[in-house]
Amino acid sequence: MRRMAAAIVLLCALVPNAAGQTPQAKTSPGRVVTTTRLVTLFSDLETQWLNALQQKDQAALDRLLGDDFEVWAADSPGVPLPREEWQKQALARPLTSFQVSQMAVRGISDEAAIASFILDRKYEANGRTQEQNDFVVDVWQNQDGTWKCTDRYISSRSGTEKRAPSRDAKPTGKQ
């Protein structure tokens, strides 16, 4: 039942983005975009999470991830990766750098929120640096005053532009 509710919440969060309606698209040129309270809060939590991976800090991960945390990937949508297996894989690759961008957060209630963002990461593997660029949607629940991620939905952005094209650009006829 919880999975069904999470899927419905996720769908509601993604529908405006599917139509190209992002917070950046709603602003006029030259206007300063202010960060919302939720974006600030969840940007900090996501940064703590990535720092914990860099430092291989199991205790910090335990504070951020729910006991039943799972990762849902686009390449195997019906088979989520359990927390223990995800942590084993994530901690096995040395994370050298990361960047979170285009963060958007939808507060569903005082106890639930959905954060979506672009995650760029660099890893060391076999003596070489490898890059990974993903679109991530995290489902967060406030459990006794502490936010914990219960589900992560992730899709690779390989082969796509790293920056969203400007919607204010005038066509030149050369595209």
Image (spheres, helix red, strand yellow):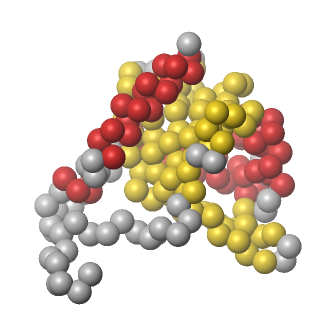
Q: Is residue 89 left or right of residue 4?
A: right
Q: Is residue 53 above or below residue 112?
A: below
Report if residue 98 is visible in the image: yes
Q: In this view, does 6 lie above or below 161?
A: above
Residue 43, given in percent of the width and then of the height, sits at 48, 48
Q: Nearer the viewer, residue 51 or 131?
A: 131
Residue 74, given in percent of the width and then of the height, sits at 58, 46
Residue 94, given in percent of the width and then of the height, sits at 78, 62
Q: What quarter of the picture does the N terminus occupy?
A: top right
Q: What quarter of the picture does the C terminus occupy?
A: bottom left
Q: In this view, does 134 lie to the left or right of 63?
A: left
Instruction: Give me the residue at 63% from left, 48% from top.
Output: 75
Q: In this view, does 124 lie above or below 57?
A: below
Q: Nearer the viewer, residue 38 or 125?
A: 125
Instruction: Give me the residue at 18% from left, 56% from top.
Output: 27
Question: How many marks overall?
Answer: 0
Report if residue 142 is visible in the image: no
Residue 119, given in percent of the width and then of the height, sits at 54, 57
Q: In this view, does 4 lie to the left or right of 16?
A: right
Instruction: Give me the residue at 71% from left, 49% from top.
Output: 52
